[in-house]
Amino acid sequence: MTNPTHSVTLLTRAGCGLCATALEQLREICAEFGIEPGTVDVDEAAATDPGLRAEYGDRLPVVLLDGREHSYFDVDETRLRADLKR
């Protein structure tokens, strides 16, 4: 796919082991659809968007699909694959 129709973003923070695992999973899943997942460190983003850390900071990692929360703590692989096919 040269023009992916979806965007996948992982909200993360430095030193988060679950976040590192989730990013590896996302890279594998998204590669099947020609998508490169993005990442946003909520602590770094807090400088310009403090609401992001307030909303998500205590339940990372969070997967956003097309800007909306899709899953948190774990990547819901089955659901993500199904949603990316749409």
Image (spheres, rainbow, N blue to C red):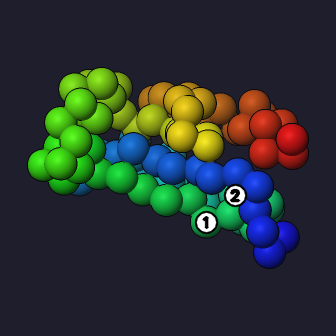
Instruction: Give the image location of residue 28, x and y in percent.
Output: 67, 60
Amino acid residing under circle 1: Glu
- Picture coordinates of residue 42, whole percent (x, y): 26, 44
Q: Residue at x 61, y 41 (%)?
A: 65
**Disc 1 marks which residue?**
36
- Is residue 81 visible in the rendered image? The answer is no
Marks 2 and 1 close (CB-CB < 8 Å): yes
Tell me: residue 52, above or below residue 43.
above
Residue 56 in the image: above or below residue 29: above
Quadrant of residue 31 within the rendered picture: bottom right
| Relative to 51, residue 43 above or below | below
In which quadrant of the rendered view does residue 59 lie?
top left
- The residue beneath circle 2 is 30
Mark 1 surroundings within 10 Å by alpha-carbon count, few (fewer than 14), some (14 through 19), many (20 or more) = some
On the image, which quarter does residue 5 sit in?
Answer: bottom right
Q: Residue furthest left?
A: 47
Residue extending furthest toward the front: 48
Given residues 40 and 73, the one toward you in this image is: 40
Residue 10 shown left or right of residue 47 in the figure: right
